[in-house]
Image: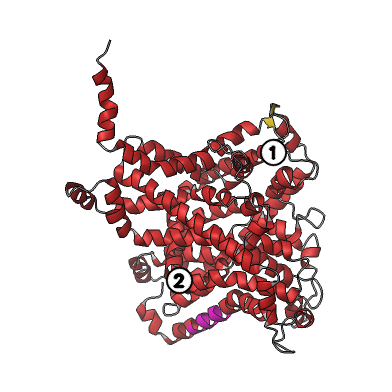
Amino acid sequence: MLSPFDRRRPPVRAGMTVVNVALFVLLVFACLGPLLLLMKFAITPTQDILRTPLAVFPNGVRWENLSQAWNEVHIDRYFLNTVVLAAGSWFFQLLVATTGGFVISVLRPRYAPLLNALVIATLFVPGVVLLVPLYLTVLNPPLIGQSLLNTVWAVWLPSAASAFNVVIVARFFDSLPREIFEAARVDGAGPLRLFVSVVLPMSKPILGVVSVFAVIASWKDFLWPMLVLKQPDLQPLSVRLPAIQAQTDLGVFLAALAISTIVPLVVFVLFQRLFLRGAGMSGAVKG
Amino acid sequence: MPEPSAVLRRPVLWVRKGGLTTLAFALPMILVFGVFSLWPILRSMVMAFQETNLVGPAVWVGLDNFEWVLTDPDLPIAIRNTAWFALLALVFGFPLPLAAAVLMSEARRMRGFYTALAYLPVVIPPVVAVLLWKFFYDASPTGVFNDLLGGFGLGPFPWLNDKYWAMPALVLEATWAAAGGTIIIYLAALVGVPGELYEAAELDGAGLWRKVWHVTMPQLRGVLFITLILQIIATAQVFLEPYLFTGGGPNKATLTILLMIYNYAFGASLGSDYGAATALSMLLAVFLAVFSLLYFRLTRGWSQS
């Protein structure tokens, strides 16, 4: 918005400095602040948290909060459950999105437009419509004849029916040069070879985006796992945390919250660019 | 009688040309979408007209479910609360991310750092964020927010315990949790505005404000319209915040439509009413579809001008 000429003028420069400082203070206070508070609470004795929540360690640090949360409240088991659910959702989402995108965009059989239309149609159905019938489907699925309730499949398989994934992967495959596919075919590569050795290696950027979305969405999910995983020893962190709140010491509970936040936070810091590109893309696709 | 080989030829040719392999590739998508997406959608259209409690066989009841839902005395309350949530979410969550994105797009050197900071709350698991804020909202004078505001001589405020304060408190947390995503989308659009437009405006003697108003905003119009309708659709289905913060209370002040659907199907002690739940889901979905259609019809003229 500002031209290079504008930027050299002293009043504009001063203004930009003010804007920078204000933005910095506001973002640190609003976005980093609650997180830092959580990290502080995680190692503060409960009495201090209750009496002086904003004081910084008036009576020292209590590291036991973390170990108690991990061992006695069994955050370790729920953590593992969360990882298992996320890993399976990730695998099935990638499997369905890549093979589906491959059929729609590369192999293009005569029925491809029909598949494409059916998948895209599900994009327009708001999630609320699916809630109850999907629950009843998991309770009594067609073809399988056995309830999926209280099994990880009840979380893994429905998560894979993501039209958004199929659409962005198919669009990415569309952008790959078709001459390469033809060349591979002339060299005698069948569909499987084409998929594994040509298309997938060229698609790392989009696989990264889908992977990050899949893991984060699974880590965040609450209502669905709560409905289909009734046994506490199967439930992920998001479902267990509200359940254990009442009978857990506050300091230990906040330590449990902090532990649940660490993994997504570390993943975000490591794959920051992937995240932000993905977030921008979701806007572009929805647009 | 037709020659058998002629009938056979087409399937055989189909297999030879790799039709089976293609089908094998399509199978995961067909099965997963068929069973866990298309089948439930079709099923909900039937279930809304049935009485189902999984004990006895489903009974066809016509429009009874809809009648029951529409005469539920809680429905007007839930509609009002959901609309109030959506409106507050627009008031809190629309101008602020936009202003932040405009300012951030100008802060060239620090932009990456600011974006990462703004996106932090989006990364925190929503359940953790709600439980943390629930603790922040502690209504005693030593609650985190009351302690903080007490430093400025304000409060203590009742937050979640008061029927007028509860909903804004929910929306504040929801806005905090979602703003980062919106900011990123706006930033991407802002960075995409061609620089020549600003240069042309400058040649015409436009100052900073007029550049923002006459160049930036019109260029963002399309993105703004889309994020607005997506936000309305999302807030109409809000569940997590009212469920975890207040459970719909105090005195039904935060009872939303999705909470009602959940209670019909899963929460009630008097047995599950899946028919009523799907009927209300369908009503909400149809309303959202009609609303979106009208919205796009109305905004199409503006966004092209």
Residues under labels 1 and 2: Cα distance?
Answer: 42 Å
Q: Residue at x 60, y 45 (%)?
A: A148
In percent of width and height, residue A258 lies at: 63, 73
Please tell me which residue lies in front, B274 or B45.
B274
Q: Position of residue A229 (x, y in %)?
A: 64, 52
Q: Which residues are magenta?
A: A17-25
The structure residue drawn at horizontal position 65% and vertical position 68%, both measured from the top left corner, is A75
Q: Which one is closest to the eye, mark 1 or mark 2?
A: 1
Write down the quadrant of residue B204 in the picture: bottom left
* Image location (x, y in percent) of residue A239: 66, 59
Label 2: which residue?
A: A272
One can see residue B92 in this view: no
Which residue is rendered at x = 52% and y = 39% of the image? B35
Whether A115 is among the magenta residues is: no
Queried whether the magenta region covers residue A24, the answer comes back as: yes
- Image quarter (top left, top right, bottom left or bottom right) of the N terminus of chain B: top left
Question: On the picture, is B6 further left or further right than B122?
Answer: left
Vertical comparison of A252 with B24: above or below:
below
Q: Amino acid at mark 2?
A: Gln
Q: Which residue is mark 1?
A: B274
